[in-house]
Amino acid sequence: MRMAGAFLIVLASCSPDAPPPAPPAPEPAAPSPILFEAPPSWVKEPPSNSLRVFQYRVPGKQGAARPAEMTVIHSRVRVPFGDNVSRWAAQMGGTEPKTESFKGKAEVDLADVSGVYTGDLSGEPIEGSRMLAAAVYTDAGPFYFKLVGPAATVGDWRDEFVALLKGAGR
């Protein structure tokens, strides 16, 4: 008899007069990635590690210049810019960086440092390097953009990199 009661409950829940089940509650939205426009000749690559949101290979504008790399990392926590500048300077052999701040779609802090790059995963120092590293502050936390590679390549793309930063936002 219990079986028949359970069967009737199931049938009643399938009746055409029963209201449809409520849709599941929506999942909270993850913050959307930052939006920016990279120059068309920059080649988007799959991020080489889980910290990176975006990664690009940046070609040299001069025939002999080697490519650079531009990466974007997101953090929900805002670290004082000076702490990041110290870390980036250490990756470039301790050279004192030039810093500036400006406003685009978001607030931006930028560091420009040249030297011997030691932050590469290969562990081999790379002479004659330059790094442009920036924090772009959004409501979802800061996004850290870093363009690093041969000084000639990075220097040739500086204006476009700054324009990219000014247009970056959510």
Image (cartoon, helix red, strand yellow):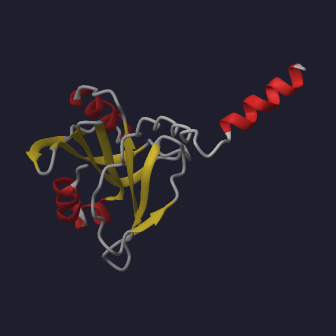
Percent x, y for residue 41? 35, 75
Up the image or down, 2 lies above or below 20; here it is: above
Q: Residue at x 47, y 34 (%)?
A: 25
Residue at the far bottom in the pictured view:
63
Image position, residue 163 (x, y; %): 17, 61
Q: Is residue 8 left or right of residue 68?
A: right
Residue drawn at point x = 17 percent, y = 63 percent: 159
Residue closer to the observer: 29 or 43: 29
Compared to residue 81, the image places residue 136 above or below, namely below
Residue 75 left/right relative to 95: right
Which residue appears at 27% of the width and 64% of the height?
A: 37
Task: Single out the residue that lies furthest toward the left.
Answer: 102
134 or 132, which lies in front?
Answer: 134
Say which quadrant the N terminus sits in: top right
Of residues 117 and 38, the one nearer the viewer is 38
Question: Which residue is at the front of the view, 75 or 135?
Answer: 75
What residue lies at 25% left-to-right and 65% top-to-bottom?
A: 157
Horizontally, is 72 left or right of 161 in the view? right
Q: Which corner quadrant of the image does residue 109 belong to?
A: top left
x, y percentage for residue 145? 31, 48
Q: Count all numbered tags in the image, as a single digit.
A: 0
